Amino acid sequence: MKNVILLSFFWTGIRSFFLKGETEFKGMPAFTNTFFKLLNDDNVNIVYVIFFGSKIETNFQINKEYKDKIRVYGFSHSNGLSAIRAITGLVFKTVGIIINNKIDVIYGHGSTSGFAGIIGNLTGIPNVRRIYGTFLCNKLDKSKISIFFKHPLEYFAFSLPAKAIICTNDGTKGDLVYNKIGHKKSPFYFWLNGIDKVNKDILSFEEVNEKYKIGFTPQICYLARIDIWKRQHLLVEALKVLSKKNEFYNTIIAGPVINKKYYKELKNNIENNGLSKTVKVIPGLTKEESISVIKKSDISVSFYDFSNLGNVFLESLSLGTVMLTENINNSLELIDENVFYDTNPLNYEETGNVIDKIFDNKEELLLRSKQAINFSHQKLLTWSERAEKELKLLCLDT
């Protein structure tokens, strides 16, 4: 039986599982699917979960179904001095676990996987690091020493020796970052995320409609964490342009509220411009509700300011819902051009015109919908397959 240390940031979508004893997660499928694979693996004895980040509550409560297999610790910080204390506590706790238990692998997630590299190399424990994307692609013109001093933890996530480094293809050019600062003896894997490939037994949209008092069938949906860099306001601006021509499209914007100020501004923008009847903002949906909304919509939108190849993009394709998006940073280089519509979301007039053209040519939209499903089934793995592929790198079955 194997013991695993998992080092991670404490994402919003996973908090209720660790704090409220729930048995399901509300987001972060790239984390949750591999995590459940670990929990349900007969070769795994204990998963020691160690969180690092700001505002981490430590009154952890694990559901009785999993509490015998999980040990969880949190190290929170708010400023420079508290960060030093949190890092010190994390290192001592992790090393203490290693001293008192036989640990087979350290599994790091996100930028905190830098800790997996540091501690793994200090103790001789194999480490596997899972990087969801990297803003270091904007630093490729800088020297290595400059990158290190400004972003030490993320630098270590790439640069220290590892049993494997996995980076999701989300347009952040993780392969180019690895080529610049990565350890050449660390195998590097550049993979797409998985999808559910659910096309039956989907929650009825009528149930979602009744629960949230939506009042219309969606034509457009924008599902993402409500935060300024997700740029939901750009869709609202395009809808405002269309409304001045007396053209309205039923739209659902939904996601957990990360930035309360931005959420309030978004709501006010909608209300103050006469869009309240056709644009509904919902602060969070369950996974089943999200799938229902995507499936019912004609198009799904992603106007992120850095990369648009996220989980919602891939899931939308699998459900036959065509994306309206921007190929920013060439983030969609592995996606067939005939399964999405491209626009410059900073140009509200252009985006409004694209939306009009989409709904004026339903035959083209239907064709792209079929092509999206075909693409997803031919090119993408299910989450179960994708998680299994990742966990094989941990060598827990040997």
Image (tube, grey):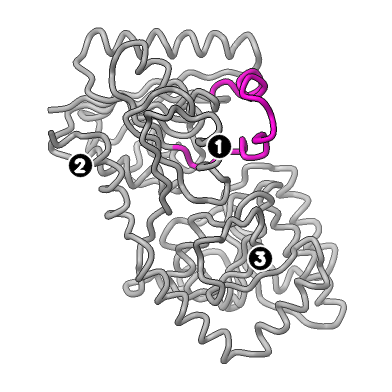
- Quadrant in which residue 232 is drawn: bottom right
Q: Position of residue 74 (x, y in %)?
A: 44, 21
Q: Position of residue 113 (x, y in %)?
A: 44, 28
**The residue under label 1 is which amino acid type?**
Val
For mark 2, what is the residue? 40
Secondary structure, mark 1, is: helix
For mark 1, what is the residue? 177
Q: Main secondary structure of the magenta part?
A: helix
Q: Is 26 part of what is drawn in magenta?
A: no
For mark 3, what is the residue? 280
- What residue range appears in magenta? 131-153
User: Is 259 left, or right, of 131 in this rendering?
Assistant: right
Which comes before the other along the chain, label 2 or label 1? 2
Vertical placement of 87 versus 198: above or below?
A: above
CA neighbours of label 2 inside 10 A, class few (<14), some (14 to 19), many (20+): few
Q: Is 149 part of what is drawn in magenta?
A: yes
Vertical placement of 4 versus 122: above or below?
A: below
Secondary structure, mark 2, is: loop
Could you say which is closer to the camera, residue 241 or residue 252?
Answer: 241
The residue at the point 31 percent across, 43 percent down is: 390
